[in-house]
Amino acid sequence: MEQPYCECEVIHEDLVEEVRSKTLEKSQYIELATLFKLFGDGTRVQILHALEQHELCVCDLAALLGITKSAVSHQLKSLRLARLVKYRRDGQNAYYSLADDHVKRILDLGYEHLSE
């Protein structure tokens, strides 16, 4: 299958300037790419999907995913630092949940895209 290729030498200055005016700082693109990288790991996405259903502790997540508590904690730390999950303490237990509705919307859009 042939790849599309632009053979013209014309630059559409008005369009380029319109898009340039809406361009973000380089650091913002890097931050966004870092956020999306977190969704590039199946275990982290599984954790997020589980937390979309219900608030859970590390032990619950480890049992659900069939991995060690240490592995779950490691993934939760990454998700917490990216502000994708939050936790609350209840005695000696920490219960995790999605940080906000934005995370749920990102997941839901991903599921929707896959089902098309």
Image (cartoon, grey):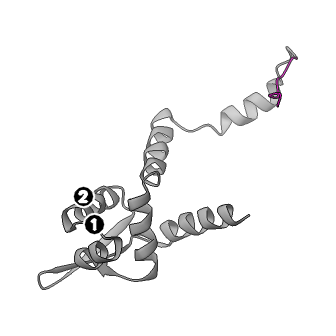
Tell me the crowding category of disc 1: few under 14, some 14 to 19, or many 20 or more residues within 10 angstroms, Cα based. few
Front residue of 111/18: it is 111
Q: What is the secondary structure assignment of the residue under circle 2?
A: helix
20 w.r.t. 82: above or below: above
Q: Residue at x 11, y 81 (%)?
A: 92
Residue placed farthest to the bottom in the image? 91
Is residue 10 highlighted in magenta? no
First in residue order: circle 2 vs circle 1: 1
In the image, what residue occupies the spot 24% across and 58% down? Answer: 74
Across and down, in percent, residue 30 comes to 46, 38
Q: Secondary structure at mark 1?
A: loop
Residue pointed to by mark 2: 74
Q: Which residue is mark 1?
A: 67
Which quadrant holds residue 43?
bottom left
Tell me, for residue 18, which label it has, or none: none
Span highlighted in magenta in the image: 1-7
As drawn, the residue found furthest toward the top would be: 9
* For discs 2 and 1, the disc positioned in front in the rendered view: 1
Give the x, y percent position of residue 8: 88, 17
- For the residue marked with disc 2, what is the amino acid? His
Q: CA distance from mark 2 to mark 1?
A: 11 Å
